[in-house]
Amino acid sequence: MTSSPGLADALPDDTAPVAAVPSGPDPSGPGPRRRCLPAWCSDPRVWRTEVLAGLVVALALIPEAISFSVIAGVDPAVGLTTSFTMAVTLALVGGRRAMISAATGAVALVTAPLNREHGFGYLVAGVILAGAFQVVLGALGVAKLMRFVPRAVMTGFVNALAILIFLAQLPELRHVPWAVYALFGAGLALMVLLPRLSRIVPAPLVSIAVLTALTVGAGIAVPTVGDKGALPSSLPTPGLPDVPFTAETLRIVLPYAFAMALVGLMESLMTARLVDELTGTPSSKTRESVGQGVANVVSGLLGGMGGCAMIGQTMINVKVSGARTRVSTFLAGSFLMALCLALGPAVSEIPMAALVAIMVMVSLTTFDWRSITPRTLRRAPVGESAVMVLTVAVVVATHNLAIGVVCGTCLTLLARRYGWWGRRGAGTEAARGLRRGGGR
C-alpha cells in the first residue's frame, strides 16, 4: 500500500516550531485552532494507512523479536516486551517519523555474551547504561558525523541489509513440510498481485489473514508463531536490575554497554537517513540519537533487552505499507502488546511461511538493484563500486553493520586521498595520452 497523495508534503519537519494557539476568545471561530494540527489529522485515508501499517508491522515483529530473544539467551517474552517498549517510546521522543525501533539482532549479538557469562540482571544493567551513553552522545552531536558517510557506503549498507534479511529467512525454509513451500509461494503471489487490484488493505495483512485461515481451516501442520515461544501474559512492570551497584559491576557492563550504544546509534542513524531519502522528508538525527537512548533506558527499567531501529520492519512500514507518521510507530508497539495479551492463541496460529514471505518481499524491494546493473557499473567511478562491494562483503561476513560502515568509509577516504577513485577507463585513457606524449 502506498502513501496518500501529498502526505509527505503535508507533514511538518520535526524540528519546525509548533504554531502557538492564541489565547482568549477567538473571533474567527474554531477554524484557526484546527489549523494548528498537521493537515493529515483530518484525512481518513492517512489514518487508515497508518493503522493498517501498524498492524502489519506488529505481526511481523512477533517472530523477529522471539528470534532475537533466542540470540540473546533470554525468554521470548523479553524480546516482545522490548519491542513494545522501544516502539511506543520512540514514537513519542524519536526524531524520524514512521521509523520502527525494537529488539534487534545487532544489539542481541553484542549483549548475548554479557547475559551468558554474568546473568540477566547484568544484561539489563548494560542496556540502561547503553541508553545513558546514547543520550550523552546524542547531546554531544555525534549524529552530525553521519553526514560524512559516503553515498557508496550508504548503498552498500542498504544492499547488505537486504541480503541479511533474506539470509535470516532461510532457516525457516529448511527441513520443513512441503506445505510450507506452497504457503510461501502463495504469500509472495498475493503480495505481488493484490496491489494491482486494490491497495485499500495492505497486501501483507491480507496474506497473513488468508494463509492463517487456510492452515487452520484445512488443518495443515506447519511451523507457526506459537512454535517460537510463549507470548507475554501481562504488561511489563518497572524495576531496577538485580545486580550489586558497585564499581565491579560497572567494570563488567561498561564495555558491552558502550559497544551496544555505538552499534545501536549507527544502525538507527543509517536507517533514519535511508527513510529520509525514501520519503523525501527530513528528520532530526540529534533527537533520534537522544530518543534511542531514552528508549533503551526505559526498556532496561522494564526488564527489556534493548534495541535500535529495524530496517526490515521500517521498510514494511514506510515502503510497503506507505506509512509516514508517528501514529504507525506507536500503533506497531501497541498492537504488538495487544495481540500478545488479548489474541495470543490466534496470533500463535499464524504460519511462519506467511511472515517469511513478507520478509523476503521486503528484502527484494530494499535491495538497490540499479546499483549493480551493467550500465551503472560502467559509469560509476571504480572506487565507488569497490566501496559498495566492500561494505556489503564486510557486513554480510560479520553481521555487524557498524564494522561494514567504518570499513567502507575508511576505504573511501583512502581512495580519495591516493587518487584511486577515478572512473572506469581512466587508466586506459591516461596511458594513451602518455604514449602520444612520448611517455616519462
Image: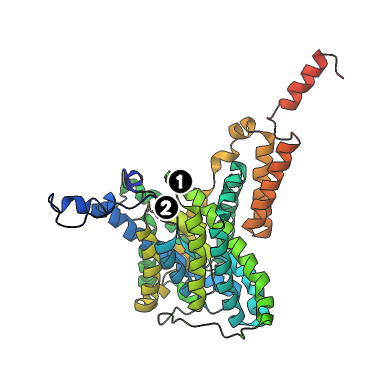
The label on residue 246 is: none
- Residue extending farthest to the right is 440
Kindly state the secondary structure of the residue where label 2 is placed: helix
Please give the name of the residue rendered at 54% of the width and 44% of the height, measured from the top-left corner. 368
Q: Is residue 181 visible?
A: no
Q: Disc 1 and disc 2: Cα gap in Å?
A: 8 Å
User: For mark 2, what is the residue?
Assistant: 318
User: For mark 1, what is the residue?
Assistant: 278
The answer to whether 77 is drawn above or below residue 393 in the figure is below
The amino acid pointed to by label 2 is Val
Query: Closer to the camera, 212 or 68?
Result: 68
> How many numbered markers are drawn?
2
Position of the C terminus by quadrant: top right
Q: Residues within 10 Å of mark 2 (few under 14, many from 20)?
A: many
The amino acid pointed to by label 1 is Leu
Image spot of residue 426 (x, y percent)? 72, 26
Q: How is the image coloured?
A: rainbow
Query: Closer to the camera, 168 or 186?
Result: 168
Please give the name of the residue rendered at 66% of the width and 72% of the height, measured from the top-left corner. 254
Image spot of residue 25 (x, y percent)? 14, 56
Image spot of residue 178 (x, y percent)? 51, 65
Image spot of residue 395 (x, y percent)? 65, 55
Kindly state the secondary structure of the residue where label 1 is placed: helix
- Kindly indicate whether the residue at mark 2 contacts the one at mark 1 (C-beta within 8 angstroms): yes
Please give the name of the residue rendered at 85% of the width and 18% of the height, measured from the top-left corner. 439
